[in-house]
Amino acid sequence: MGGVPQATKGMFLTRVLANEPLCRDHWRLVIEVDGFPDAQPGQFVQVLCSDPDDDRHAGGAYIRRPFSMGGLRRQGDRCEIDILHRVVGVGTRWLSRLQPGDSVSIIGPLGKPFQLFDDHSVAYLVGGGIGLPPLVWMAESLKVAGKRAVAFCGARTADLMPLSCEATVPSNVADATPVVRDFAQFDTPSIVCTDDGTLGVSGLIPDVFERYLQRHAADAARSAVVYTCGPDPMMRAVAEICQHRSIRCQVCLERMMACGMATCQSCVVRVRDKKRDEGWGYRLCCTDGPVFDAADVFWDS
């Protein structure tokens, strides 16, 4: 394990290496931590969005916030973690002001990750907005596993795309849109779309994804698996497309989690359960997920 400790999770005081704006509202925070346990794409950390040495939490948030990990790099016992965050409130506003050398308290890694399947050689990564980071890390895992992947990256408009896109479009790649460097570093071609057409293909990402499947139906039906993360309406639409085409799909759900460790019971997800007379039951997103089989999830109407 190269010096990686065997604990499954813990509380860590980390050091900020970088905190850079990516677009209008999104930032990439890079933190450094010693002794962080083994982790996989889809898992998350609970971040204290206030000064760890200030009991009053002045200028920040009292309750920790959950953030998926967008990447993890190790060198011996030392680990770098990428966290993408969007400024929407007190906690994330505090995060956006962090400078290199500042301290941040995290708990993790938490939750269940995405699964790799031996019988699926093609993976489609479908993400929208703040749901894209775990899919970038998943692209790296797929490359290491020798799997072929295609990424579908959606946002409402160009200045809300939290990824690095090239201005040019490759002429030798089918279905080409501007190259996303975050995925290209893992040899993963990407298809970019925005709701208003200001970057890449115009349209909603489930529609763009379905049109792609129509053009590559044989490949999808034979050996594909889908990993998706983003807003619930987007994931629900992707899950329904996959169900219609009998494609296996894993969803990484986003829920507010006060604790992240099944203590507060605040992040319930309704799932199918054949053992119950009702045919369904509740699971906790923080410990039973955040990754679920899409076929098991009851989506809110």
Image (cartoon, rainbow, N blue to C red):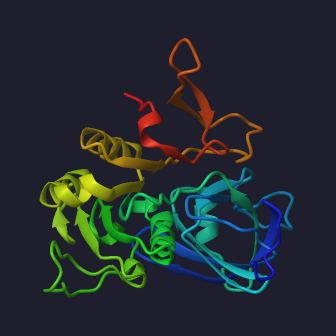
Residue 158: image quadrant is: bottom left
**Furthest-top residue in view?**
277
| Front residue of 107 and 75 | 75
Comparing 72 with 89, the one in front is 72
Image quadrant holding the C terminus, namely top left
Q: Which residue in the rendered view is the most extreme toward the front?
A: 119
* Residue 231 locus on image (x, y percent): 40, 49
User: Is residue 191 found left or right of 140 in the rendered image?
Assistant: left
Q: Position of residue 36 (x, y in %)?
A: 77, 71
Q: Is residue 197 visible?
A: no
Tell me which residue sits at (53%, 75%) in the image: 28
Q: Quadrant of the N terminus?
A: bottom right
Which quarter of the picture shows residue 22? bottom left
Q: How many marks?
A: 0
* Residue at point 18%, 86% (across, down): 170
Locate residue 157, reporting x and y percent. Answer: 27, 64
In this picture, residue 199 sits left or right of residue 227: left
Q: Is residue 168 above or below residue 50?
A: below
In the image shown, does 111 or 246 lie closer to the viewer?
246
State the image coordinates of residue 238 (x, y, percent, origin top left): 31, 47
Q: Residue at x 32, y 47 (%)?
A: 247
Q: Is residue 236 visible?
A: yes
Q: Is residue 38 left or right of residue 247?
A: right
